[in-house]
Image: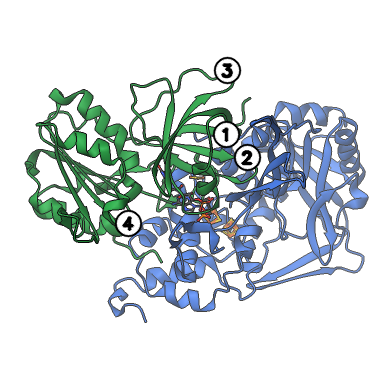
Amino acid sequence: MRDPMTPSLYRVDKVVRELPDTATLGLVPSGGDGPFSFRPGQFNMLYRFGMGEVPISISGDTLDRSRVVHTIRAVGSVSRALTELAPGDEVGLRGPFGSSWPVDEAAGHDVVIVTGGIGLAPLRPAIYHVLSNRGRYGRFVILYGARTPNDILFRSELESWRSRFDVDVLVTVDSAGREWGGNVGVVTRLVDRAGFDPLHTVALVCGPEVMMRFAIPALNGRGVPNGRIHVSMERNMKCAIGLCGHCQYGSYFVCKDGPVFPFARIATLFAVREA
Amino acid sequence: MPDMDAKASGAAVVLGVDGLDALVGLLVAGGYRTIGPRVEEGAVVYGPVRGVADLPAGYVDEQAPGSYHLTRKKDGKALFDWTVGPHSWKRYLYPPEQLLFRAERRGGGFSVLPAAEEESPLAFIGVRPCELAAIAVHDRVFSGSGVVDPGYAGRRDGAFLVAVNCTRAGGTCFCPATGTGPRARTGFDLALTEIEDGKRHLFVVETGSERGAALLAGLKAPPADGALLATVTRLTRKAAKAMVRDVPKDTPQVLKRNLDSPRWDDVAARCLGCANCTLVCPTCFCATVEDTTDLSGGVAERWRRWDSCFTSDFSYIHGGVIRREIRSRYRQWLTHKLATWSDQFGVGGCTGCGRCITWCPVGIDITEEARAIRAGEGRAGEGRR
Ligand SMILES: Cc1cc2nc3c(=O)[nH]c(=O)nc-3n(C[C@H](O)[C@H](O)[C@H](O)COP(=O)(O)OP(=O)(O)OC[C@H]3O[C@@H](n4cnc5c(N)ncnc54)[C@H](O)[C@@H]3O)c2cc1C
Ligand code: SF4
Ligand code: SF4
Ligand code: FES
């Protein structure tokens, strides 16, 4: 029996330095593992030799079976070590795990993405999916917030999406110098300005929990009900298979019942002060 | 719980102390690692036993919130007059430290070598009914919820369980409230009831599996008569009556709607956050992982170790600990045990063994806290201090 805690080996095939602290890794199986398939919003556990294993969302296109793509921001020892990998290096990989963005359920609706910082990475597969199936959706709005203009992730992709006539991309930063002529302020303010039909909208939200605490009331304020708001939750994870207990959130295991939840399912828990 | 006394006792036989010794001997001869109760450092713990001589004859435990005392009755002969100590069988089925894999550097990459697990099967002697229930809970956790932990499943499949019914109530246990004892109904290979009243010292042995029946067949034991079976029922019922703690059926709902009860602050002021309760609890399964490398950096290992929701790292994510205060850690523990567990696994997370009450240094009683939260319902408006 294969131990679900034993990783498969993957070789780093491509590295893109997105930002000073953020890199995108393309991985290919080094052993006998066949092509990798996943749903938008799912994540893998990436193991760096001798250092540790951390949950990282898959940030690539579900249609691209040539590589497994992850975008990692260095915040501590393991994530930093992962961003420092070079082509040819190997990592351990377990996955894919968890629930996904409801891209099928959203068909026929306007899709509104609200995200900040590295939170854009777990949403990129959903963005690719909507763009590949553009005719199945109504309006498509991407609202993205970064700390400063220099922290905008996937900048050239955001620019190319913005240049399309069938996507609205609004970007804001928390602070900027004079040379920035764009929006300044929190991403949730963009919710009020974006063009979508709240009665026929599915919202996908991923970012720090504080951002969600503002994004959800803003969406509710526009008339989007909790049942059509989907959020990706973040909790400490040591196994991703429901065995270590670390990711518990009320009755849920974020690793297997989440990380993506319809907000209506967790709204009561979300209102409880956890600290 | 349906009364299944008649059914369970269908194949009951009688063994003397020598017969029990022979039974353990058969397990040893059969290649089992036989584990049972032993006295160590003033407590009954589980370790290797080779026969009746290793069992804690005459020992009785006195337990109360925050206290455990083991005494030896002068001329006491009973082998199972104690109830449960700080150990539970999880340390054998899900050991405190397990090697997950070794990795060795190879050029720019590495190879992964799974941890080899070739151990002889386990036989447990003296598994209390609440502990059979705890093992059944772990069966759900480690192999009945979609993912199978192969180490657990391997050890569990081979394990031979000799249960022992409780004829004396421990000072903190409440298995009648959780429906898990004091008489074993299922989940054992053999179940003993010890009868020792000065005049006689014998064991009524019920069979729970083919394996159990096959082992018993080697002992040529006489059947237990109706009077003996009636004694088993009487003794276990007496033990049940002696347990007073209660966990009402609607406890999950009560806890879930009182996550902001001021009682969480009250208990947090007493709780030391020491994690004793989670370590002694036979159902707590939380674990963390640790990575090590050798001095050359060429060999790495990944270990899984028991963890506890009471540690501050447990809920750490980049940017801070989520359950910063003891209040929220205690709330996680209590609501997991008595409420959210059954949503996750379709079975309760508490088997009423009382260990967390006994081994809490300040004597916090999980049933009393649950009761206080219920009693405080509606008074939540008083808010946090
Ligand atoms: C479902 C999910 C998807 C994620 N996707 C991405 C992604 O696509 N890109 C990205 O850059 N980051 C992502 N993260 C966050 C990433 O897992 C953490 O940044 C990483 O675990 C930090 O580890 P560290 O050792 O570098 O940091 P440290 O701060 O040193 O953390 C020590 C340990 O704590 C735990 N830990 C710390 N932060 C987190 C966290 N946020 N979530 C879970 N465990 C944590 C880990 O076990 C970690 O090894 C995701 C987290 C989750 C839960
Ligand atoms: S919660 Fe306490 S009484 Fe219940 S099974 Fe765990 S240790 Fe025993
Ligand atoms: S009570 Fe705490 S340590 Fe025990 S299983 Fe639940 S989360 Fe894990
Ligand atoms: S990460 Fe281990 S239970 Fe969810």
Q: Position of residue A132 (x, y in %)?
A: 22, 23
Q: Which chain is green?
A: A
Marks 1 and 2 sit apart, C-alpha to C-alpha, by 8 Å
Q: Earlier in the sequence, mark 1 or mark 2?
A: 2
Residue B155 falls left or right of residue A186: right
Does the residue at mark 4 contact the one at mark 3 (Cβ under 8 Å)? no
Q: For the residues tagged 4 and 3, is the chain the same?
A: yes
**SS at mark 3 in the image:** loop
Marks 4 and 3 sit apart, C-alpha to C-alpha, by 39 Å
Which dot marks residue A154? none
User: Dot 4 corresponds to which residue?
Assistant: A209
Q: Would residue B242 be seen by someone viewing this image from the given angle?
A: no
| Residue at image coords 91%, 45% | B51
Amino acid carrying mark 3 in the image: Gly
- In which quadrant of the rendered view does residue A48 lie? top right
| Residue at image coords 87%, 40% | B24
**SS at mark 1 in the image:** strand
Q: Would residue A162 be seen by someone viewing this image from the given angle?
A: yes
Q: For the residues tagged 2 and 4, is the chain the same?
A: yes
Mark count: 4
Q: Which chain is blue?
A: B
Does the residue at mark 1 contact the one at mark 2 (Cβ under 8 Å)? yes
| Circle 1 crowding by C-alpha within 10 Å: few under 14, some 14–19, many from 20 | many
Which dot marks residue A49? 2
Q: For the residues tagged 1 and 2, is the chain the same?
A: yes
